[in-house]
Image (cartoon, rainbow, N blue to C red):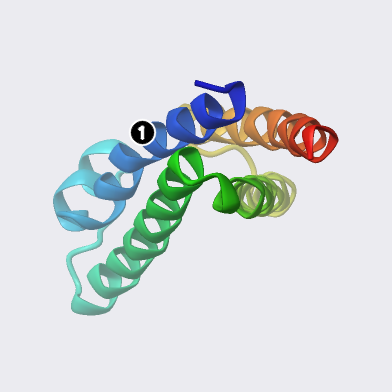
Amino acid sequence: MRIQQQFLLVAAVGLTPIALGYGLQPSTSLAFLFDIDASSINSSHIFRAVMGLYLALVLFWGLGAFIRKYQLPALYSLTVFMFGLAFGRALSLIVDGWPHWLLVVYLLLEVGFGLVGIAMIRKTEKEG
């Protein structure tokens, strides 16, 4: 298995529990993890939509891991996704201050995955 495939699978497997934590039972998981009250219908709706977005990308990255023609688009989408999340979190650090420690860990992981994503894109494009 090529390193690009492994990278896409690690990202997909790693983000699945995060997605489910956001949207499967948001009123329970978000209250437990981050002291967020997601008990309203609107809050649950938003967090379940976020879960859907995460799971859709997880599925696409899985396809990219196993179907060669989707590999480069999957790597691009993963990189944009990770840097997009990292940008939003960095902005929040500046505007809002320090969040829960786990969210800072997410930021570091997102930057790391984004940087590795760039390396994987370059490697894939070189291989043709």
59 left or right, relative to 79: left
123 in relation to 27, above or below: above
Q: Is residue 127 or residue 103 the one in the foreground?
A: 127
- Quarter of the image containing the C terminus? top right
Secondary structure of the residue carrying tag 1 is helix
Residue 125 percent coordinates (x, y): 81, 40
Q: Is residue 8 or residue 21 the one in the foreground?
A: 8
Q: Residues within 10 Å of mark 1 (few under 14, many from 20)?
A: some
User: Total of numbered circles in the picture?
Assistant: 1
Residue 100 percent coordinates (x, y): 46, 34
Residue sitting at 24 percent across and 62 percent down?
Answer: 38
1 left or right, relative to 124: left
67 left or right, relative to 69: left
Instruction: Specify the quadrant of the image occupied by residue 110.
Output: top right
Residue 58 percent coordinates (x, y): 41, 49
Q: Amino acid at mark 1?
A: Val
Residue at image mark 1: 13
